[in-house]
Image (spheres, grey):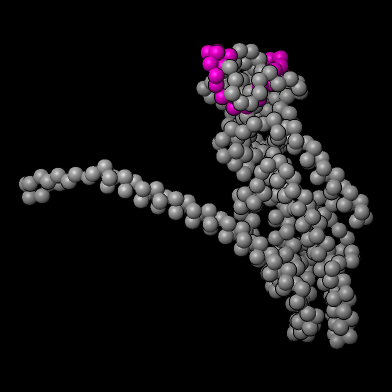
């Protein structure tokens, strides 16, 4: 340090440097731990909120609704109209096995019938509105049950494939969602419906993004994932994917739904297409002879994205296929071999449930 023309030196011992480095590591570990705690806390808050909504719905009484009808029938009618518009719009966008008729018997059918009777006796001019509200509650509860059932099936399938459904929910930021009805007094059952549908969508989107379709028509795998003898040097080396042998120009397909994140050339890989499936999951298709996709393109499982070739570090025409989670290569074989059966089991369960309900 220079001060008033004088130069002074400060020596830091190795021991002091090690102590400082240790303090920095502890601080970084604490920061990472706090971030992990915040993520877990966010997930638990979501679960607690959903539980509280269920409790609130259970203790809702007909007397509070009668009071609302007495105070302003016109306002109740406007609220019911907005709610009906939301329900109809949402119902049109949902899969068939989540849809339901509005007059289906619900968990609150007895309560709803009592509400209709009491309002009809107390406020005869509001009897029609009370019946509409009862039908809306029945539809909301029916859709909530279906959404919860589908979410449980998707969660079980994701776990069976060795992935973490909680990570998918956190990535989708389901805890950021708001109530199903955006204006007026919100019946807890409708807010509960919005949360259930958001959770179902996040889990099912995550399930659709899991590699489940073979990237080529040919069944032959010329080289597996893991350590092998390098074809160029003869030394042992890690092979981070599966090699599918095939004629030049044979089609290459996306293994799951996602969005194309890279189209171009990479050292060693030659011509490459990468597909981002969300939740840190990515698939890579290398040694292509031609591209069949563009960056930003949305693809489904089985969409043609390129053609087999021998570009890059390759001894002959084949596809090098990788699955990466948070940019770490994992063995693609368990996904390709297990996912189709798991997903088919989920679909069969959904069809059986729908048939039983009908």
Q: Is residue 293 left or right of residue 60?
A: left
* Residue found 58% across the figure and 57% down from its top: 40
Question: Which residue is outermost to the left?
Answer: 5
The answer to whether residue 294 is magenta is: no
Q: Name the spot of residue 68 as percent of width and height, x first.
A: 75, 81
Which residue is at the far front?
Answer: 15
- Nearer to me, 20 or 199: 20
Seen in the image, is 85 located left or right of residue 230? right
Residue 236 is a magenta residue = yes
Q: Does residue 265 lie above or below 28 as drawn?
A: above
- Quarter of the image for residue 226 reads top right
Q: Say which quadrant the C terminus sits in.
A: bottom right
In the image, residue 261 lies at what x, y percent? 59, 35
Q: Which residues are magenta?
A: 230-250
Quadrant for residue 147, please give it. bottom right
Q: In the rendering, at what x and y percent does residue 338 appear?
A: 75, 36
**Residue 61 in sight from this viewpoint:** yes
């Amino acid at each position: 340090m220079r001060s008033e023309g004088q130069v002074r030196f400060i020596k830091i011992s190795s021991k002091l440097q090690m102590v400082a480095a240790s303090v920095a590591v502890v601080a970084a570990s604490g920061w990472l731990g706090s971030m992990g705690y915040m993520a877990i806390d966010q997930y638990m808050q979501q679960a607690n909120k959903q539980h509280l909504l269920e409790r609130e719905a259970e203790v809702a009484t007909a007397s509070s609704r009668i009071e609302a009808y007495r105070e302003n029938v016109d306002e109740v009618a406007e609220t019911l109209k907005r709610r009906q518009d939301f329900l109809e719009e949402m119902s049109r966008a949902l899969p068939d096995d989540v849809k339901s008729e509005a007059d289906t018997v619900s968990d609150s059918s007895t309560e709803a019938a009592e509400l209709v009777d009491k309002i009809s006796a107390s406020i005869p001019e509001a009897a029609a509105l009370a019946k509409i509200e009862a039908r809306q509650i029945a539809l909301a509860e029916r859709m909530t049950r279906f959404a919860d059932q589908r979410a449980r099936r998707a969660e079980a399938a994701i776990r069976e494939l060795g992935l973490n459904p909680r990570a998918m929910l956190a990535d989708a930021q389901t805890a950021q969602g708001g109530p199903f009805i955006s204006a007026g007094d919100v019946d807890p059952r409708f807010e509960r419906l919005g949360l259930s549908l958001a959770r179902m969508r996040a889990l099912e989107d995550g399930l659709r993004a899991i590699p489940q379709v073979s990237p080529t028509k040919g069944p032959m795998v010329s080289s597996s994932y893991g350590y092998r003898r390098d074809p160029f040097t003869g030394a042992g080396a890690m092979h981070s994917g599966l090699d599918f042998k095939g004629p030049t120009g044979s089609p290459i397909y996306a293994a799951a739904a996602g969005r194309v994140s890279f189209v171009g050339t990479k050292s060693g890989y030659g011509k490459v297409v990468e597909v981002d499936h969300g939740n840190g999951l990515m698939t890579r298709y290398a040694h292509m002879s031609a591209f069949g996709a563009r960056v930003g393109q949305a693809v489904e499982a089985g969409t043609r994205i390129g053609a087999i070739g021998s570009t890059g570090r390759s001894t002959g025409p084949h596809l090098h296929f990788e699955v990466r989670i948070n940019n770490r290569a994992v063995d693609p074989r368990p996904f390709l071999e297990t996912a189709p059966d798991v997903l088919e089991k989920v679909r069969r369960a959904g069809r059986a449930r729908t048939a039983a309900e009908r």
